Amino acid sequence: MLERIAAQAPAFFSGSNAAFLLEAVGRTLWMTLIGCSIGFVLGLVMAVLRQSRSRATLPLRLLAIGYVEFFRRIPFLVILFIVLFAAQPIIPEASLLTLATIAVVLLATAFLSEIVRAGLESVPRQQKEGALALNFSAAQTLFYVLLPQSWRVILPPAAAFMVMFIKDTSLASFIGVAELTFAGKMLVNNGFSPVLGFGTVLLLYFLMSYPLARLAAHLEKRLASSRDR
Amino acid sequence: MLAGSVHARPIQEIVRDGTLKVGVNPNFPPMSSYGPDNELVGFDVDVARAIARRMGVKLQLVPTEAAQRVPFLVSGRIDMSLGALTRTPERERLIDYTVPLHSEAMGVITTARLPVSSWEELNRPDVTLVNMRGNQSVEVLKEKLPRPQRLLVDGNADTIRAIAQGRADALVENVDFFIGFTKNYPEVKWQILSDPIFVAYCAIGIAKGNRGLQAYLDGALYELHSSGEIGRLWQKWYGAPMTVPIRPEQYVEAADKVNAPMTGGGGSGEGRGYDFAFEEVLDELPYLLGGALVSLQIAFISFWAGSAIGIFGAVAKVYGGRVTRGIADGYVTFFTNTPALVQIFLLYYALPDAGVMLSPMTAVLLGLVLNSGAYLTEILRGGVISVRRSEMEAAVTLGMGRRQILWHVMLPHIARTIYAPLSNFFIWLVLGSSMAALFGVEELTGRAINISTANLRTIETFTIVALIYVSLTIVASVSLALVGRYAFRVKMKPL
């Protein structure tokens, strides 16, 4: 086994393979970053919606609750399949990468809206009552009272979620998105040793995930201490 | 939510847009695969190029795995599908075909390990046949060779790898398509039995009712066959003529259409709308629910075996010396920062090279257990450090023994801290077990893939499977919350 790896190493670490793997890394990061960012915005909207108590938004609130409960309870792989086959008649021009990113958005919206909601609910009730007493509008309460006090609670778990998702996008290889895991599979299918192919892919994932995970942990510590101050 | 209408482009629109979208398999040499420059090359690619050239349009190759061919045509993602699409009645309901492009003669690829001289001798229960999901031969073989065990994999390369690594004994398929991969394993004594079991014909697939394109392609194939172009391309990529040649009468009917004008040709090209057919999937509900049980088993085993590792890990991280702590840290850091999927790939595909062979189920379980161990180490550590020093000191002052401290002071604290994260982690495992499907384990998602590649009702199948997952995890969440409330006095919202 070791001889095989040694014999293949020069051919494996060629310029074209390196470029191919780097492109794949780019797609992995793209899916995570774009998918989670859009998911965060949508999740924020959904969480804010669920804070409202007016009767007019009741159907929307129920819809949001149903959405969150549904998408948090099905595997990413199944979401990928449903998006792949259901979204096509609507947007036949979309690339596989786009479809996978849509799947990320669907899932990230559900999880991030829960994270945002927990953040908004962490603000003491008296703050809201104070805003009400000062005759703040709903938007003013949100932007001047709730969000400034809750982003410290929201940001650390939201960042951790995004870092976690880097790994989950590996499932998109199955529907044919040429991301990092797909690239590894292709190199192995072309005859390279699985240790070399998948080992390199594993290392690349680690290099993406570890520094970001450290950053997220650092963020959590800093924000937590500033909150206690 | 889903529009029923499907957009298949009529030939006029393809010509106006100037691009023909052709589905080819990305992992199917010499039919089509990524060459040394990571560009698609092969027989299918050359055929697609010849057709696009004749049509006077640019060619856009869309990587299409075997199981995606029909859904991609139905949805209009591709105008035509190559990739050795065999004509079958199930597919005929959803798509249309041209005249044959090439034949497909089923033979046997096996190794010297299995001393057989004809395909009938494979009909033994101690033989494992490997095959690809979505291939028409899967169903044919159930009839012709009912007794062997079966291993379903997802790519052409995976079939040959499975035989080389000893997971399966033989592949009954079109020998031409798979023989290319055997050169990846020069140390294996390959054996080919090429007496054809039966012959099928592969055609170009197009969306249902796209008559104009069909007539045009029939004509194009007539020309490519009779000019000898297809024969030349086959010889170029396969190094031999087609085992069973296409007979002229199979495409002579196309001769009339050879000059079919591009703009006419009849048929609007609008495929008939997609009709949802949930009944077909509901018939399979018992099979799917059986798969859900397998998913739960995977989650249970991973959870409890992972907890055992997690206890050691947590104790090592909190009370361990420098070395033990370092090992536990390294383990957790590695496994929580890399995808479980790739870890299992490595266990499943690389360990056989070192002489350790894991079944798909074992590989998935091992991967998930190691992963759970890492995450549970962190959760349990959080529990251990939740016990405050002052409480421990108070217990010592009160004269409590070690066992009493553990039982009355530490454990209640730990249980209350970790109960909610543990419950969430279990739900995560139920969902995460779906990964096993990618290794051919027949749990819920795996069975869904099996069903949908046979009945081609992908959307319906996965919608029902999604609902099964939702119900399963809601039941699990509610029961875990109730147990938590009454046994550990943990306030948890059930949803």
Image (tube, coloured by chain):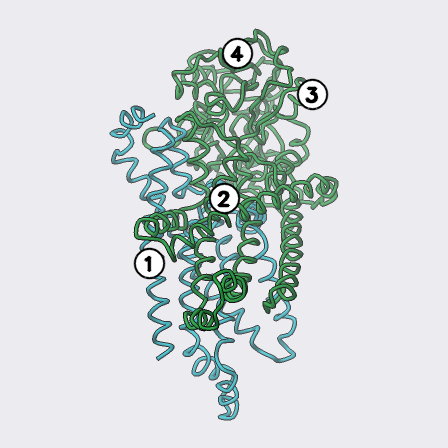
Q: Label 3 amino acid?
A: Glu
Q: Amino acid at mark 2?
A: Leu
Classify residue B470 by image quadrant: bottom right
Q: Amino acid at mark 1?
A: Arg
Q: Residue at x 38, y 16 (%)?
A: B186
- Give me the disc on residue B143: 3
Query: Which tint was used for chain B?
Result: green
Q: Position of residue B113 (x, y in %)?
A: 50, 13
- Tags 1 and 3 on a common chain: no
The disc numbered 1 marks a residue on which chain? A
Q: Specify the amino acid type for callout 4.
A: Thr
Residue B239: where, in percent of width, then height? Answer: 42, 13
Give the chain letter at badge 2: B
Residue ID for mark 2: B368
Tag on residue B243?
4
Of the chain colours in the picture, the one used for chain A is cyan
Q: Quadrant of the N terminus of chain A?
A: top left
Chain label for disc 4 = B
